[in-house]
Amino acid sequence: MSDALANAVCQRCQARFAPAERIVNSNGELYHEHCFVCAQCFRPFPEGLFYEFEGRKYCEHDFQMLFAPCCGSCGEFIIGRVIKAMNNNWHPGCFRCELCDVELADLGFVKNAGR
């Protein structure tokens, strides 16, 4: 183990690392493999995929349940770009004209009779 890692501590539990231990490096933050877990369910991240919000890391399921808005059209969680219009949240592809079905996300629209 290098001198730099000899004094390093886990971001979550603040304990040092054993010389032959596997270490997770997430954007310069070091973790024991068993400490690199979701802040909500405390399970390891499937395939290393996680979402970060306010400095805490979450698995996809918990991130969606806690923070992702639901689309006013399809009802699915929205990850990525959110269109906020007509007192609702929309996927860009779901926010469409009711008459001609054209996507409105980048065009603008006029509300008429609540539609």
Image: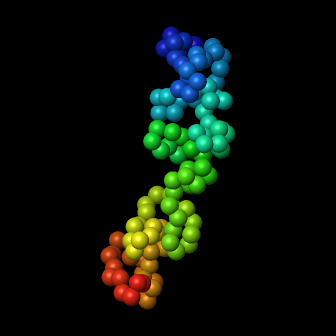
Residue under the point 40% across and 67% down: 84
14 left or right, relative to 55: right
Q: Residue 104 location in percent, x, y? A: 38, 76
Decide if residue 27 is in sight here: yes
Q: Residue 25 location in percent, x, y? A: 53, 29
Residue under the point 52% across and 17% down: 8
Q: Residue 94 location in percent, x, y? A: 48, 73
The quarter of the picture where the N terminus appears is top right
Decide if residue 2 is in sight here: no
Residue under the point 62% across and 30% down: 35
Question: Nearest the camera: 74 or 107?
Answer: 74
Residue 49, compared with residue 25, is above or below; it is below
Residue 46, compared with residue 90, is above or below; it is above
Q: Residue 107 location in percent, x, y? A: 33, 75
Q: Quadrant of residue 33?
A: top right
Q: Quadrant of residue 97?
A: bottom left
